[in-house]
Image: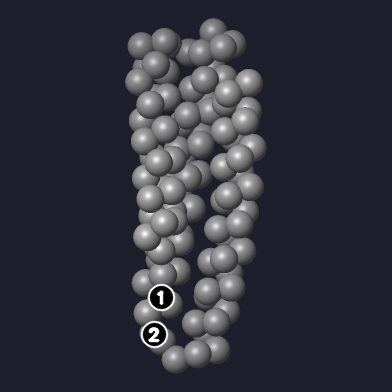
Amino acid sequence: QTATMYQLFHATAILGLSSTLSAKQNSRQIAAKTNSSNSADMVFLAGKLLSIGTVMFSGSIYCLALNVGPKAVLGPTTPLGGLMMIGGWIVVGLS
């Protein structure tokens, strides 16, 4: 249940980031090149971190719950995915 809630929440956030990135890229094409390119890069990085972190976190919990794969590898994958999601949210806050 935890993995599903996190996956749903972060999927919504990733969709929001992708629409923000699209809007930033469209505005960058219209306006002269300014600081928006750096902001768009930050949004892109945040989306990558959230996506990879969600797959690692939720995927490892799913595999552990279903007894699929080696527990020695999947156990440490869960907190690493969580750290990547936290890093993505920090980048969102900074962008």
Instruction: Answer whether residue 45 is visible to the viewer in this image.
Output: no
Relative vertical location of residue 74 with respect to residue 93 in this rendering, above or below: above
Disc 2 and disc 1 in contact, CB within 8 angstroms: yes
Question: Which of the 4 image quarters holds residue 46?
Answer: bottom left
Q: Is residue 47 left or right of residue 13?
A: left
Question: Looking at the picture, how far across and down is residue 60, in whole percent?
Answer: 49, 22
Question: Residue reaching furthest top?
Answer: 67
Question: Residue reaching furthest bottom?
Answer: 32
Alpha-carbon span between mark 2 and mark 1 = 7 Å
Q: Is residue 32 left or right of residue 62?
A: left
Q: Disc 2 marks which amino acid?
A: Thr
Instruction: Answer whether residue 55 is visible to the viewer in this image.
Output: yes
Q: Disc 1 marks which amino acid?
A: Ser
Which of the colour schemes (rainbow, by chain, secondary structure, one colour) is used?
one colour
Q: Is residue 78 left or right of residue 1?
A: left
Question: Quick one: 53 or 9, which is closer to the camera?
Answer: 9
Task: State the residue position of label 2.
Answer: 34
The disc label shown at residue 37, or none: 1
Q: Residues within 10 Å of mark 2 (few under 14, many from 20)?
A: few
The disc label shown at residue 20, or none: none
Question: Looking at the picture, how far across and down is residue 29, in whole percent?
Answer: 52, 85
Query: Quadrant of the image for the N terminus?
Result: top right
What secondary structure is marked by label 2?
A: loop
